[in-house]
Image (tube, rainbow, N blue to C red):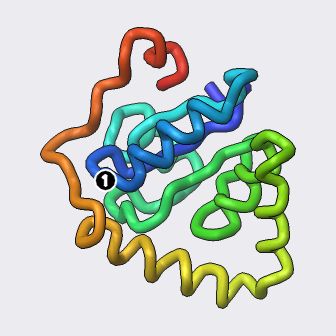
Amino acid sequence: MEQHPVVLFDGVCNFCNGIINFLIQQDKEKTFRFAPLQSAAGQALLATHNLPLTDYGSFVFIENNTAYTNSTAVLHLGRLLPWYWQWLQLGWLIPEKERDALYQFIAGKRYEWFGKTESCAVPTPDMRSRFL
């Protein structure tokens, strides 16, 4: 299931869904696979990596059987984006405590700022193969 890097995201979060749409656009090689945290596949991967099954305050990036959360997930994922996004790697210069504080602030406000839906978005037919 994890031969491709996997992004687990809050499927009811409008901001998170926007980020997933952005990643799909940027991922010309179709490297990433995606699953809502709330889905059966997302729940199975969370359990496999001993992560909480009900706390959707962070997206999860899984690569080479290692799960990353919070700002560390963003930075690991970012290194697989096209060259023009590699400036994001400067984030490694910021101590993890500060990076995660900013990440958690944004995560805590995402519903307030961007809203949420009643259920997970359904991928379009051409995107469906990218979802677990």
* Viewer-proximal residue among 81 and 39: 81
Q: Name the residue under label 1.
A: 13
* Viewer-proximal residue among 85 and 55: 85
Residue 48 in the image, given as x and y percentages of width and height:
55, 45
Q: Residue furthest left?
A: 118
Vertical placement of residue 73 versus 34, above or below: below
Tell me the crowding category of disc 1: few under 14, some 14 to 19, or many 20 or more residues within 10 angstroms, Cα based: many
Q: Residue furthest front?
A: 84
Q: How many marks?
A: 1
**Measuring 66% from the left and 89% from the top, which residue is drawn there?**
98
Q: Element at badge 1? A: loop
Residue 69 in the image, given as x and y percentages of width and height:
60, 63
Residue 68 in the image, given as x and y percentages of width and height:
66, 59
The amino acid type found where label 1 is placed reads Cys
In the rendered structure, the answer to whether residue 55 lies left or right of residue 8 reads left
Vertical placement of residue 70 versus 35, above or below: below
**Measuring 18% from the left and 40% from the top, which residue is drawn there?**
119
Residue 112 image-quadrant placement: bottom left
**Measuring 77% from the left and 51% from the top, which residue is drawn there?**
85
Vertical placement of residue 69 versus 48, above or below: below
Q: In which quarter of the image is the N terminus?
A: top right
**Measuring 65% from the left and 32% from the top, which residue is drawn there?**
32
In the rendered structure, the answer to whether residue 10 lies left or right of residue 130 reads left
Residue 43 in the image, given as x and y percentages of width and height:
40, 43
